[in-house]
Amino acid sequence: MMSDMRQSLLRRDALSAAKEVLYHLDIYLSGQVQNNPSPSVDTPTLELVEEFILHRRMSALQELQLLEIMCSCFQEQSRDAVRQLIFSALFTLQGNQADESRMALLGKLVSMAIAVGRVPILECAATWLQRSHPVYCRRLVRVCVCVFQRSHPVYCRRLVRVLVDDYCSLLPGSMVPTLNNLSCSCPPFCCQFITAVTTLYDLSTEELTPPVQLLQMVVSWIQDQPRLVLITLLNTPPSSSQPIGSLDLTPLAGLVRWCVKAPLAYRRDGKQDLANGTTETELEAGPLFSELHLSVLQVLLLLPGVLREKGLLGRLALLQPDQLTSLISDLSGLLEELNPLHSDTQAHIQLTLDRLAQALQVSMAAGALLCSREDLRALCSRLPHNNLLQLVMSGPVQQSGFYPHIHTPPLGYSPRPSPLGPHPSSHSPSFPPQPFLPSMAFPFRPSH
């Protein structure tokens, strides 16, 4: 049957053949969902998709028409299970040469779906971003699956880079209402988009600093709907771990990295304004990062109720120790690139350390960060002195029972060995270290 269908498709033009394959997918997978308790896509169908949708050359007009047909296909299919299977058949990574064409088509389809408001496609894209994509081969199956699962975040970053280029670089400001409404029309996609975009733009270089238009959009989304950041966590079955090769359950770790690193990253990248030592981009982005930092702290305060409801309070670390280790290592590198003796640089250093201290304290209090204060002291010992960070490392003023999941190891965790490894930096910093002073007095700390 498949061979007859293939012969029929070979006689058609590229667009007509692709449309026929989509129609076949819809009929075939609708039957699978209805009659099979575990529906799946067979290999011959996947081969048809690759040959007649991904490999056939089309003109720009034919490609645009194909995207419109695909939008209509997903919009008209009323069953979510069938839509997800069709999307999986089209865009699940297979570890072959067709993946490049797959990613190119996916980027164009999702970009069009944002522009014309095709929510079913965005919901499928959200699922695609979250799940890992194992690939199976006849030899070295275990190795191939492991390697390919770990490469999935790379493809997630490729997809969001296409979207950022389309909406923040090529058309800045022209799609603001459409993008702002996206947080209401499809929160799952927005949550996964933020998670992926914070892994792409890690502020390690000037090119990997988030564009101001992107930052404005993310801040607007989270301010309008703080629980947006937790949508994937809320919709995921309770588990104290997540699949290898998938994105984080929340973008919290990436957002904390943005807020903490921003003052020093912009200081490193920008050219100094002779008037006040502040960069032009920094003037624009600085207030946005301040707003984002406040929003992230407010989201963290929502976490205890969510984690308790799912039975994961004290069991699931949304901020992983290795992510914290990486962040502090990045800060050490940034500090060594800057001149710590410059008065303006000192102000930026203290702002960075204030934000780090606030994020650490609220994360520990909310159960998002599961590590002891001894681990924090060891990790932060190479950072410059900061009063607020010193206070956080010395522990809360309240009795130890106030934050029980901080002071007693949660189920399945032990205080030793330390989850935070030794600091990766092999060279000494050029600034005073952060000592731990348990008896240090603070004018704003109660004496009783």
Image (spheres, grey):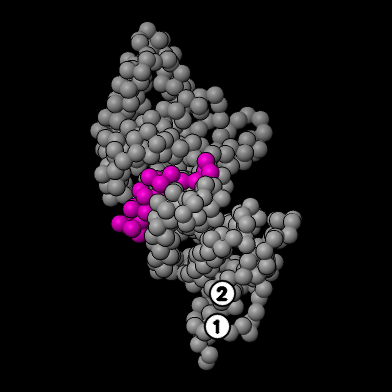
Q: Magenta includes 175? A: no
Look at the picture and state if 240 lies above or below 159: below
Of residues 178 and 70, which is closer to you in this image? 178
Look at the picture and state if 182 lies above or below 425: above
Q: From the viewer's perspective, is 303 left or right of 119?
A: right
State the residue at coordinates (53%, 44%). 206
Identity of the amino acid at label 2? Asn
Please name the residue that numbered disc 2 is placed on: 387
Q: Magenta includes 211? A: yes
Q: Quadrant of residue 137?
A: top right
| Label 1 crowd bin: few (<14), some (14–19), many (20+), radius 10 Å | few
Farthest residue in the top direction? 11
State the residue at coordinates (27%, 29%). 72
Relative image position of residue 418 (x, y in whole percent):
68, 66
Q: Please report whichever mark, 1 or 2, sits nearer to the chain's N-terminal start.
A: 2
Look at the picture and state if 50 lies above or below 323: above
Which portion, as a residue range, is magenta?
206-229
Identity of the amino acid at label 1? Phe
